[in-house]
Amino acid sequence: MSDHESDPLTSTAMVTTDKASRYLQQLCKHFGHKRPVNFTPEHGSIEFDFGACTLSAGEKMLTMTVSAGTPEDLERMRSVIASHLERFAFREPPAIDWR
């Protein structure tokens, strides 16, 4: 297997919000009940069996990067993270555009 075959697939979404740190911490605390997480008000990471998510909160921007080993798991990571953020941010539905 070459190095490229073992590289995880990644996708990033940048969400404009005044509550970036709040949402980062909310996501990490929520998943922390069942998944390994690490977080500060500015950075976070969540580990899943099928992938991982790293989060970064700026003053008006939440950056979420998901990674996984297969395209199907990458799509699952996008869906899981986006659906939870949408639930937490229901008062200001976020525009989540994965790239």
Image (spheres, grey):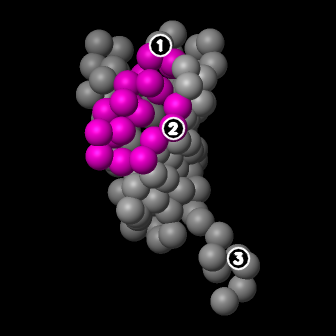
Q: Is 56 situated above or below 41?
A: below
Please name the residue that numbered disc 2 is placed on.
Answer: 38
CA gap, disc 1 and disc 3: 36 Å
Query: Label 1, on which residue?
Result: 19
Q: How far is the residue under mark 2 from the one under mark 3?
A: 27 Å
Question: Looking at the image, is mark 2 or mark 3 earlier in the sequence?
Answer: 3
Q: Identify which residue, 45 or 95, lies in the foreground.
A: 45
Query: Viewer-nearest of labels 2 and 1?
Result: 2
- Label whose residue precedes the other's in the sequence (1 or 3): 3
Badge 2 element? strand
Neighbour class for label 3 at 10 Å: few (<14), some, many (≥20)? few
Which residue in the protein does label 3 denote? 4
The residue drawn where x is 59% and y is 14% is 60
Q: Residue at x 44, y 17 (%)?
A: 22
Identify the amino acid type marked 2. Asn
Q: Amino acid at mark 3?
A: His
Q: Magenta region, mostly helix, strand or loop? A: helix
